[in-house]
Image (cartoon, rainbow, N blue to C red):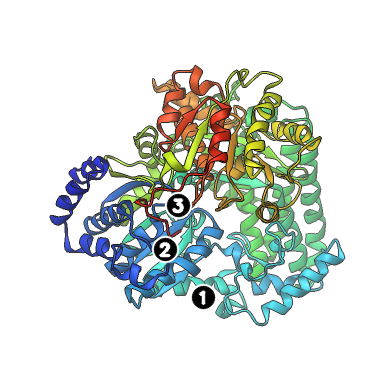
Amino acid sequence: MSDFDDDVRSGDDADDRGAASSRSVFARAARDALCDGGALADAIPGFSPRMPQQQLSMAIAEAVEDRSVLLAEAGTGTGKTFAYLVPALLSGLKTIVSTGTRALQDQLYHRDLPRVRDALGKGVKTALLKGRANYLCRYRLEKSKGEPRFTSKEQITQFQRIVAWSGRTRLGDLAELDALPEDSPLLPMVTSTTDNCLGSECPFWEDCFVVQARQRAQAADVVVVNHHLLLADLALKQEGFGEILPGAQVFVVDEAHQLPELAAQFFGEGLSARPLVELARDAQSEAKSVTGALAAVQTPSRVLEEATRAMRVAMDMLPTRGTRWRALQEPGVFDALSALDDALCAFIDAIAPLRDASPGFDVCHARAIEQRARLVRWAPPDFARRHAAAGAEGDAAGANAALELPSTQAEAHATSASDDVAQDLDSGIDEKKLWDVRWYELSPRGFRFQRTPLDVSGPLRTHREQSRAAWVFTSATLAVAGGFDHLSERLGLDAPRTLIAPSPFDWPHQALCYLPQRMPEPNSRDYTAAVIDAVRPVLEASNGRAFVLFASHRALREAADLLRADSPWPLFVQGDAPRSVLLQRFRDSGNGVLLGAASFREGVDVAGDALSVVVIDKLPFAAPDDPVFEARLDAIRRDGGNPFRDEQLPQAVIALKQGVGRLIRTETDRGVLVLCDPRLVGKSYGRTFLDSLPPFARTRSIEDVRAFFAEPVEPDPSHDSPVE
């Protein structure tokens, strides 16, 4: 840790000022812009200077100047967005800012970035860049007109709205269509994927919204992306356009705690039912414009669709997710897998002679080869050996060259996720892919076969070092008991600079942490009923106004049944309505109680009196049925580590901090955090959780909770208000 980090952690203002005096002109300029009388205070109504924000901005400026790496936790209310935008804009360097979600991306680009840019008087070019699935594809739209794929009048109406909008949109960003649900079945019909994009062969290439968005990004000084797009670039998934984000000198990764899990998805690969069905249907659609093609394509396309559906039916009796080994123990799954492979090979044979007839068929052929390659790479080694020779002579040879087929070994009989890894060891698979976990996940009508690496630190380190850029990783939840070792290791960071910028909120006065007494063990049958019993008097004291967050959907449903019987407060239950609708109804109610699962721990922002209580039923340890997590724990154990200490505990601490962060959002908020899990006081590791939380006053008495709500205390005026 640098001397600068020691100064920041000390909290001594005099020391901070002394350290700042020796820092660069650039770092002081970043600080001054955020001070009283600075550029932001003069230009942004309601802006209030905060020392932690200034410390954070100076640390970021130093990292930018040195082209170094900074890990920075910024407590809730610090104003981290302004803290990193100021040095990024003052630097004049090409900057990529990556956020956790598209919603945060839009907020940053449309609200925060223009305010800081205007306040600083910097005429920098900015661009918003999303993944291709967010942009209208004119070619796909035209191909979908007249297609009999609509299943309801509502879909026909929505499609007509898309067509009308397509004639007037300038950017082609589907976020402009407020009425279009994120899971609309129309989206695959009007957007492209890496697989089905025609690239420069497309007749709409000159008017392509994806191409135009990337051209704007190329010319911009500051580009706002989300983690999915950043990782697509880092993983060299070039989507047919070459490098997506070239030439950046500064990378700012906000909500950085999400990055390792997302990176595992992008450095792995998957095969799912929907792309296979879309492949078959796209080939049939393309055949309508090529004379004589329909007769050749229709049957293999139909067989591919049927084999895909049969694959899902064969997995009906399996748990929702599990390892490859578990799937293949189910009778009929191996045969369905073989039939799907045969269908793909027949499809490849049928499309191959048509490749020169149209760009669409050429793309369909490439997609089919890639899908088959993914299937064989996911399947067990003996499957690959038996089916390696399938397909047309020339085309199968090309396909098998892409498969990187393992040498011959029968699959070992195993019982856990790590045994799939062990079997690949025995099979001679490339050591670079040694710690990939092969697993499946089922949806009501589909399936997904996934190959996920256990450790992404290597590729992340490689891409970061090759960029020769400054990297800033920040979030409100990065540290565990004041340390960054866990995240540093997963991100592949070697001795990065670190900083904890504390929240400016007056936690001892604004919040109270209540630990109910006499709670049963979390695995007991009556635990959820005990949680509701413990929470009722809190809700009575607060008159509702609460989030009650559960570790499982089963507990969520049980709690909803218990509260529905006699709740005097409006009750909102996750799953009863879309998330955004549920939140708005909760805000509007004024005294509602919202029951949610893990997804409500993160990214939910309800400021003011509408939310005054956050209840967390159990410590958020990862689900034991996650095959990737299970394999990761096994790998830690094999390496001589402690799976609980090195992985389970840090992950749970970060997740808990996310839930706690929902409670206090502004300097005037007041609220009670209820942590029901008795392990917080009954187990030695409970101290790690408590030490990682803000400096709450803590109590085990419900009378203290009643007193807290009965006698509001004004916040300490010496604490600054946030701007975000």
Q: Is residue 691 visible?
A: yes
Disc 3: which residue = 667
Q: Earlier in the sequence, mark 3 or mark 1?
A: 1
- Label 3 is placed on what type of residue? Glu
Q: Position of residue 562 (x, y in %)?
A: 77, 32
Q: Position of residue 147 (x, y in %)?
A: 81, 69
Disc 1: which residue = 212
Density class for disc 2 (Cα within 10 Å; few <14, some 14-19, many ≥20) is many
Q: Earlier in the sequence, mark 3 or mark 2?
A: 2
Q: Secondary structure at mark 3?
A: loop
Q: Secondary structure at mark 1?
A: helix
Q: Which mark is residue 245?
A: 2
**Viewer-nearest residue: 512 or 683:** 512
- Label 1 is placed on what type of residue? Gln
- Label 2 is placed on what type of residue? Leu
At 55% across and 80% down in the image, what residue appears? 206
Do the residues under discs 3 and 2 have CB atoms within 8 angstroms? no
At 29% across and 64% down in the image, what residue appears? 36
Do the residues under discs 2 and 1 have CB atoms within 8 angstroms? no
Q: Position of residue 86 (x, y in %)?
A: 33, 64
Foreground tag (3 vs 2): 3
Q: Is residue 424 visible?
A: no
